[in-house]
Image: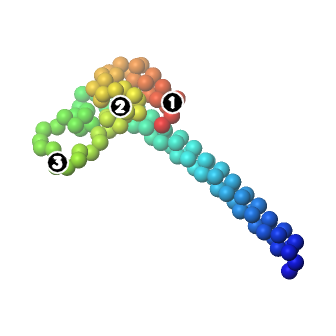
Amino acid sequence: MSSSSIISRNIICISILHWHQIFFLLWLAVQSHTTRLLISKIRKRQATFFGHVMRREKLENLVTTGMLEGKRSRGKQREKLIEGLADWLKAGKSLEAIEATKDRKKWRTMIANAVKQGT
């Protein structure tokens, strides 16, 4: 093999490697975008269901707010649904989010604003 054929072969290998990296980065961008859209959809559905449950004064209301009698388990406490939604909706505290569910129009605008801002 001559030196020019080795050089041209190396150039081809390097260009293929660069194309592979470019396509891989594009694939990662597509995957992260679809993941963000999916997470946004899930949070929106959680928030609408939470508003539906909180407007009703039933057992589900007590369970989702965590106001049940009994002892708490030891160790680090699990994050509650309302705390995650309050962070996503930027409602401050969870009590503010619970109060916002009483007014359906206000709750829907909070959800719409959170979806527009993204995850």
Disc 2 residue type?
Ala
Three-letter residue code for mark 3: Ser
- State which quadrant residue 55 falls in: top left
Left or right: 31 as drawn, with respect to 22:
left
Q: Which residue is mark 1?
A: 117
User: What is the x, y in percent for residue 50?
Assistant: 35, 33
Residue drawn at point x = 44 percent, y = 28 percent: 111
Quarter holding residue 103:
top left
Cα separation, mark 2 vs mark 1, equals 14 Å
Q: Secondary structure at mark 2?
A: helix
Say which amino acid is labelled 1: Gln
Q: Position of residue 107 (x, y in %)?
A: 39, 23
Can you tell which mark lies on residue 69? Answer: none
| Of residues 57 and 82, the one drawn nearer to the viewer in this rendering | 82
Q: State the CA–CA distance, disc 3 to disc 1.
A: 36 Å
Q: Of all residues shown, which one is farthest toward the bottom?
A: 1
Q: Is residue 77 visible?
A: yes
Give the structural element (helix, strand or loop) at label 1. Answer: helix
Nearer the observer, 13 or 109: 13
Residue 73, disc: 3
